[in-house]
Image (cartoon, helix red, strand yellow):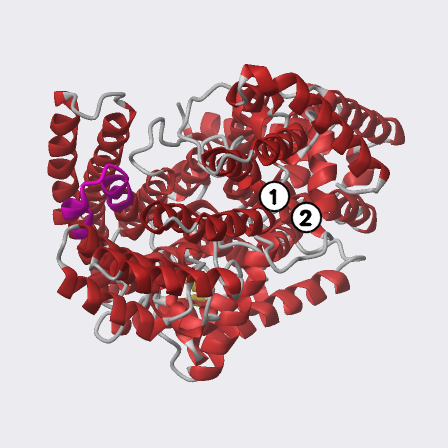
Amino acid sequence: MTVQENHASSNAWQALLAEQQKAAPSTPLPEAAGEPLALGAAWMLVLMFFLLPVLGAPEAAPVGDSVKSAIVAFGALGGLLWFALQRRTHPAPLQSHWFLALGVLLTLYSVGSIFWAHAYLATGEALRWALLSLVFWLTLQFKTRSFFVALSWAIHLGVFLSSVVVACQYWFGVEWFAQAAQPASTFVNRNFFSEYAVCALPFSLMLLSRLRAGFPLYFLVVSLAVDVAAFLMTGTRSALLGVGVALVAVPMMFWFYRHPLGLTQRWQASTAGTVVLLFLAVVVALGLLPTGNPSILKDHAVSGRGHSAFAHAFQRFESTGEAQTANDKSSISVRFDMWRAALKAVAANPIIGVGAGTWEVVIPLYQTEKSEIEIDYYVHNEFLQLIVEYGLVGWAFVLALLALLAQSAWQLLRSVTSSEDSNLAMRLTGVLSLVLLLWVSNLGFPWHLAGTGAFLALNMALMLAPSKSVAETPIVGPWQAVWPWATAVLAVLGLLATVYGTRQAFIAEDRYMRSIGLLKAAKLLPNPSDPRRKTYMELSLKAGKEAVAINPHYRKLLSQVADEFSNLGDWRNAVWAYELMAASRPNVPVIWANLATGYSYDADHDKAKDALAKAAALKPDAYSVRYATVLVQANAGDVEGAAKKLRSYIEDGGFNVPLVDATLIMARRTGDWDLALKALEGGRVKAPDQAVRMSLQMAAVYNLLKQPEKVVLAFRDALVFGAKKGQQSAVLQRIPPELREQVQALAQAQIKADQAAGKP
């Protein structure tokens, strides 16, 4: 091709671009010179945000968030490597912002915590903040028009596919991914899905504002409606409220910014009306379809909730304002308990905090005497947890984050009438997504999860105004040639470490879950003398020791191994697991109490007393400590003393379900059935979910005492409690055939009397 032909071709191409822009005007977004998306490492972040909601763990191991953490690590480090290699041939100033220094400071504080707090947990925190700081820095380098558009589509499509999985789980009960609380898609827990998806909502809505009438627009509307229906199916209250705010606030934002966003050029009134009607029609249609998931149906039967997504979401909102009782174990009351303990920890450690990641290790020291909810591991308020663990460094991060958000929001408000801000769509999206993330951060721990943690870094970078707050750092002299290679080497080392660490984590989680699964299989064998039982337990111990050799600090899974061994009566191996847990979490009284119980059943009474003393030194009146006290004393031969102590616990009301069960064990030794009946009566009030079982146990005790009239009344109570939970058939099977007709008549009369009295 000649020079003249090349010049003519270039002119023709420019004319075609100009004509296309005239035909479909859109809000201008910056495109860095010499750095189009097709060139670069920005694709790594785009791919990362697409894969985060799409990929999960099909089995219980590896753990779902471990998969997503690996995606973030490979995406960020892969992006850094690609970016460094690009800069060898495309030198340009680097983008920076002072907020990055706070991310680095959190990383350094976490590294320092390794030497004085919990080394394993602090290491995890250091890696988390280092990766989030890297995502923030890379986003600053990639803030171009093509990056933002591609990123928004990747985020939207990823969440849409994840929402389809939620719908399939809700309607059909499919189990493509490991689930703890359904429907959760690839996120294990439905709250985790909702918190991630609500952060993605502004990206989907901003895409909506950039499309003309046509298939892409209507596909986006329908897929967005599917996302909203998935929110309803999960029933996560904080995320649902965030969705409601976003669906009201964003249309208002579109109206105020209609000129800068170019909406007046792309949308007509008829287009807006069609979009709204189509969206509402799809949401209503999907929201009215009933669930067909057996697990969800069972949960709804117990809680009395409706079977459609609309009914479930509405009733979840209603439960938010329910009054708390002394025995309330709802998620809201548990959060209040954790927050109160966290405030005490802040008051006791205002300067340096308790150490990065060390919340779950030290928080038992600040809880009430009978509170044992440290097993939740997180405060369920990210701001509070950061301040508890990091002290003044945490305060600095939180205040700077809020200040930057307020500054960005104020700048955006001042630009309502402006048509010159080429970053407007990007910055609006970053601000809205960050606001929603901070909202759900008040009731959960999304910064500790890989996907929503990545959103924190991404949104912080997107909302910044480049011309005012993001500075260019030119690289001069020999560093221009050196730094890309040095960065590439650092990225390669990070990727190799990520491969090794991910492999080790996956192996450890697989061995833990294998150990737990084998123990559960052994427990299901009907014959305790079945030789397979011993084989399963030996294989479980082998898998458990392999897991511990890699990671002895994985309390959540190790505790399940210990509990399953104890349920099978293998106290020697249960003690092995409890000892590891006590060494890793020395301030948790329930671990020492379980260890004391294990020593006691294994006839090691001296060690049992020592472990019990450590538990009592932490919380002498904790339910687990009281339970262990009774068992250790009884197993050591002092049955009368143990019975006397147990009676004092029951009479002062300081007991829980295990202590109720302990009265039955003790009654078989002492014959004190009156105490057992009193405990069962109180237990039905303290633990309504156990009322059916305890009523049936009362019937058995009355039958032993030859009191047939009270046997009938206890069966009646069991049937009444069962009727409230849809368990009448199961309860009837436990009642002798000759008594069923009489018990049913009494139960029906009692139910009518309760309804007339307005009792629930």
The disc label shown at residue 239, or none: none
User: Percent position (x, y) of residue 146?
Assistant: 53, 40
Horizontal side of 11 relative to 48 (left or right) equals right
Amino acid type assigned to the residue bearing label 1 in the image: Val
Q: Earlier in the sequence, mark 1 or mark 2?
A: 1
Residue 572: say if magenta: yes
- Quadrant housing the C terminus: top right
Give the magenta part as a residue range.
561-575
Residue 687: say if magenta: no
Amino acid type assigned to the residue bearing label 2 in the image: Gly
Using the rendered view, name the quadrant where residue 105 is placed.
bottom left
Residue 358 can be seen, yes or no: yes
Residue carrying label 2: 242
Q: How many marks?
A: 2
Q: Secondary structure at mark 1?
A: helix
Residue 154 can be seen, yes or no: no
Q: Is residue 605 above or below residue 499?
A: below
- Quadrant housing the N terminus: top left
User: Percent position (x, y) of residue 512?
Assistant: 23, 39
Which residue is pictured at 35% across the width and 46% down the height? 665
Residue carrying label 1: 198
From the image, give the main secondary structure of the stretch colored magenta: helix
User: Percent position (x, y) of residue 751?
Assistant: 75, 32
- Residues 749 and 213: in front is 749
User: Percent position (x, y) of residue 513?
Assistant: 26, 35
Which residue is pictured at 62% across the width and 42% down the height? 236
Which residue is pictured at 37% across the width and 37% down the height? 64
Horizontal side of 117 relative to 453 (left or right) equals left
Q: Are marks 1 and 2 in contact (CB under 8 Å)?
A: yes
